[in-house]
Image (tube, rainbow, N blue to C red):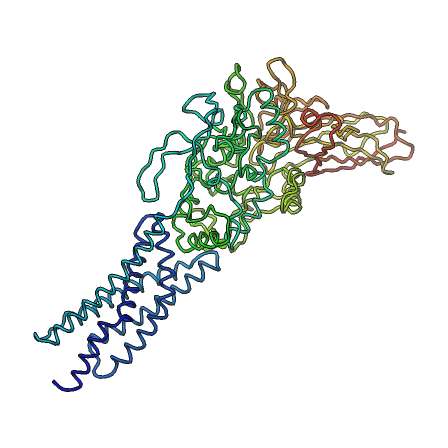
Amino acid sequence: MDTTRLNAIEKSIKGWKSLLSGLTSGLIFYGLLSGLAIYALPFSQYNQFNVLIHTILGLISLVPIGVYCWKHWKTRTGGTLNHYQLLGYSAIVFLVICLITGIVLTGQSLFSNRISSLQSTIHLLSAIIVGLFFALHILTIALRKMKQGKIKTQIKSAQKIFNLWVLSVTFLSVLWGFIGWANYQIPEKFQFFDSQYNWRFGQDKPFQPSLAVLDINDSDQSGHQKNHPLKAANPKYLSRSKSCGSSNCHENIYKEWLPSAHRYSSMDDMFQKVQTIMMTETSPEHTRYCAGCHDPISLLSGAKNSTNVTLGVEGYDEGSSCVVCHSIVKTDVQGNGNYVIHIPDRYLYELNDDPISKLVSDFLIRSYPKHHVQSYSKPLYKTEEFCAACHKQYIDKQVNTDIGKVQGQNQYDSWKNSRWYHKNDPKKSISCRECHMPLQNTADPANGDSSDYYRSPTDNKHRSHRTLATNSYIPQLMKLDGAKKHIQLTESWLQGRIDIPEIADKWVKGPVVSLQVIAPQSITEGERVSVAIAMLNNKAGHDFPTGPLDMIESWVELIVTDQNHKVVFHQGGLDDQNRVDKGATFRADGFDRKGALIDRHNLWDLVGANYKRTLFPGRKDLLQMQFQCPSMARGRVIANQKGEAIGERKDLIQFDTANLQQGINKLHIVAKLWYRKANPEFLNAVYGIGHSKVIPAIMMTEAEQDIQVLHAQ
């Protein structure tokens, strides 16, 4: 045998025995095996440790792999190109691609807000190709024909050493993951109810009168079904919304949510006052009725009980938190918080507070995002029925004891019976989310949507989580982050000054409720004048106003001045106690079983209403025909032959002009529509006489007209 051949054999034997070759090959084999497991195995604690170890060893292996490939290429290069070398070169090329994309994905997982799906796909495919070429390269060398003899025995012995190194490195790497899994203790999702928990409404109905349901038939992170006994939720699993808005993730969405009504639904001072009154006049357990929508974390954690003085729990101040809303898997349009929550499994260390745990959990969410996306993004959230679970309300015997079902606020049915809803035709309809959650430009990882006909997967937009509506007071009262901007936007929203491009072709411009002053162009001095105020609900997808109408108040103010700006007639102003001085008032007066007024949002006493006035959306507001305005001449629907649209309401106002000053030849009429979140009667009943709370009124729109005054001859 010639010297060249002997040298080649010696290099081969040395290469098989080499620690560097065994370690490198073991790391490559483990990387391929663990990478396939990440994609193939279900979400679990072990597979998360697998992601971590795969990443750590992948970064560590850069040095030995680089050194080995360089040395191996220098040793084996030269001579005639054969299939052994071609397979080896090909494996190295794709290995470089795999390592580079792995580094990019690691950087994105650590410092960006999402990983690139293209990079992830290239990383996976290149790893599979590396494994294929690497295996063929090794096998063709190991299985090539050799004559029996000492050399063959030496090579086979060296190959066994190589195989042992590969298996040992792979085994130890896999074992590392199992050790991490075995020593990790994740907090339990569920906890037993307090031993003194009051099962007032039934042993199988722990949260009623709210209709909220906690899904306790859960799967562990290995996919095995577990059937828990009846338990409450661990509040940690439903709160901690701040983590969603940190580390470059859903930062903009979190900032939008911070001053929103969904966030402060439980910490709202007025809600807390009413809840205290309800607890005193009924029982702590009755407050579960409100909590399904206002304070779901406390409710589902079993805190709405007589054993808990505060009726709250850790995380209650998040109201409808990120996880609460995004864990709902089923709703019912019956309302009263009728939804089912399935608490998703959390990532490793996600519920810990230290910076290292935060770094690890954020890295896992971004590098292994499938579970996160599937858990928190569902088609249900794009439906009006999702909103209906809370935005529809009635009182039943569990709350009012002996009366039975009394309908409360109901935005869902109001919308569904309006012109904004067209069954099975979303292109003609306007839904809740399109109005209250308009699209925002964003770099948020949640941008894009292929299931919305307005959207595309790469539109770089998300839906605003401000859910703008009408409450401009609580963000200011509670001094919430971002309150100033939120209040400004709420006022603009009420005044109809916010454009929504996606529905611009279906939505009119201008005020939410239009006003029109209808009066004669001229009058004779001393004549009794009749003025009509026509109102039309242009934009609200439901009744205006809507919500708790025993608290909310909207009204029309009318001011008539002469050409010298002297007030001739004024109705609908505020008196020294901040009450409306007559005027067309939109509100509801509920009464209890004794006929007394519902004045402190004491819905547990509600049996009916003796006055209610709202504007139905669009022109089909038939309910208006029955409403009366006690502070003005009765409103009436004007017949179609007079040219007004069906659904408009006109309020007739009369005043004398007999006492006008000499020389007056013009009157100026201004009508203003005002809105405020709570009326003085409610505030007095809840906070007591002499309180300092003043709910600012927002002028939504105004209309004006001049009348010429003709002097009698």
- Residue 332 relative to residue 630: left or right: left
Q: Quadrant of the N terminus?
A: bottom left
Relative height, residue 675 to residue 254 (above, below): above
Picture layout, residue 617 above or below residue 120? above
Determine whether 130 is above or below 218 in the image. below
- Image spot of residue 191 (x, y percent): 43, 34
**Picture residue at 40% right of the left edge, 52% below the top:** 369
Viewer-side residue, 7 vs 139:
7
Relative placement, left or right, of 484 versus 54 is right
User: Left or right: where does residue 258 sit relative to residue 234?
Assistant: right
Q: Tell me if I can see residue 213 in this picture.
A: yes
Judged left or right of residue 484, residue 216 is left
Taking the spot 36% from the left edge, 58% from the top edge, the residue there is 53
Q: Residue furthest right?
A: 662
Q: Nearer the viewer, residue 315 or 127?
A: 315
Residue 300: x %, y % from top left: 47, 32
